[in-house]
């Protein structure tokens, strides 16, 4: 059973299904985010800021850098997901690195990351996502903002497995989690928490 800290937006609303088969190939995970920073380039500084951070800019495509993953959300704007630094460390590092080329907003508590993985993951996504996610159209690294279950999400295809990371605003996380579990109940599925060892 998952035992997330009570101050997590999902609280104790996360419970393991009563019956799980060894053949289950659908996993719902609540993923810990070490730090989440939104960065905004100043006017005419987008390319310089991206170069400073080592971001390869490509519409609709995440960039996997050494210290973070950059998810584009608008021209000159990215959500940076730290791989191991805390919010204060990561925010300070980003601010120093961009050196006045833009602005930094620390938003680690603003979103919850929910991961859907396994052979049935695409089936779950097609029940709620309005985008065409067929493998002939999108693949690993694809990133987009969309609506699922009437809730805005930032989606990132982490792997062609497929593995989808969905970043949901904290205030809508419980509603989204409820919809996701109801939808996944058509299949047998596992639930896990990833990276929460230091928070439990």
Image (spheres, grey):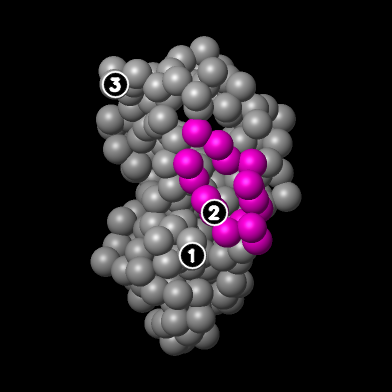
Residue drawn at the location 60% of the way across and 72% of the way down: 105
Tell me the element at label 1: helix
Q: Earlier in the sequence, mark 1 or mark 3?
A: 3
Q: CA distance from mark 3 to mark 2?
A: 24 Å
Please state the horizontal and vertical placement of residue 99, each as a whole percent of the image. Answer: 46, 86
Please rate how many residues cluster around mark 3, counting C-alpha atoms within 10 Å: few if below 14, some from 14 to 19, many from 20.
Answer: few
Tell me the element at label 3: loop
In the image, residue 106 sits, relative to residue 71, either above or below, namely below
Please rate how many residues cluster around mark 2, counting C-alpha atoms within 10 Å: few if below 14, some from 14 to 19, many from 20.
Answer: many
Tell me the element at label 2: loop
Q: Earlier in the sequence, mark 3 or mark 2?
A: 2
Residue drawn at the location 50% of the way across and 24% of the way down: 18
Please state the horizontal and vertical placement of residue 171, each as a whole percent of the image. Answer: 73, 50
Q: Which mark is residue 161?
A: none
Residue drawn at the location 50% of the way across and 27% of the way down: 17
Q: Which mark is residue 4?
A: 2
In the image, residue 50 sits, relative to residue 5, either above or below, namely below
Q: Quadrant of residue 68?
A: bottom left
- To which residue does mark 1 refer? 199
Q: Which mark is residue 22?
A: 3
Residues at discs 1 and 2 in contact (Cβ within 8 Å):
yes
């Amino acid at each position: 059973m998952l035992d997330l800290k009570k101050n997590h937006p999902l609280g104790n609303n996360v419970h393991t299904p009563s019956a799980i088969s060894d053949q289950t190939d659908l996993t719902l995970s609540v993923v810990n985010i070490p730090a989440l920073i939104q960065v905004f380039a100043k006017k005419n500084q987008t390319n310089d800021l991206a170069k400073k951070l080592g971001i390869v800019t490509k519409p609709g495509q995440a960039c996997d850098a050494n210290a973070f993953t950059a998810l584009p959300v608008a021209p000159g704007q990215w959500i940076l997901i730290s791989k191991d630094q805390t919010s204060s460390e990561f925010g300070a590092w980003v601010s120093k690195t961009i050196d006045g080329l833009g602005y930094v907003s620390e938003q680690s508590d603003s979103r919850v990351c929910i991961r859907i993985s396994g052979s049935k993951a695409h089936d779950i996504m097609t029940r709620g996502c309005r985008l065409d996610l067929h493998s002939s159209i999108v693949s690993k690294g694809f990133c987009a903002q969309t609506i699922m279950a009437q809730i805005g999400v930032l989606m990132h295809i982490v792997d062609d497995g497929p593995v989808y990371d969905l970043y949901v605003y904290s205030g809508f996380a419980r509603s989204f989690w409820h919809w996701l579990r109801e939808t996944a109940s058509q299949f047998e599925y596992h639930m896990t928490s990833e990276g929460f060892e230091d928070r439990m």
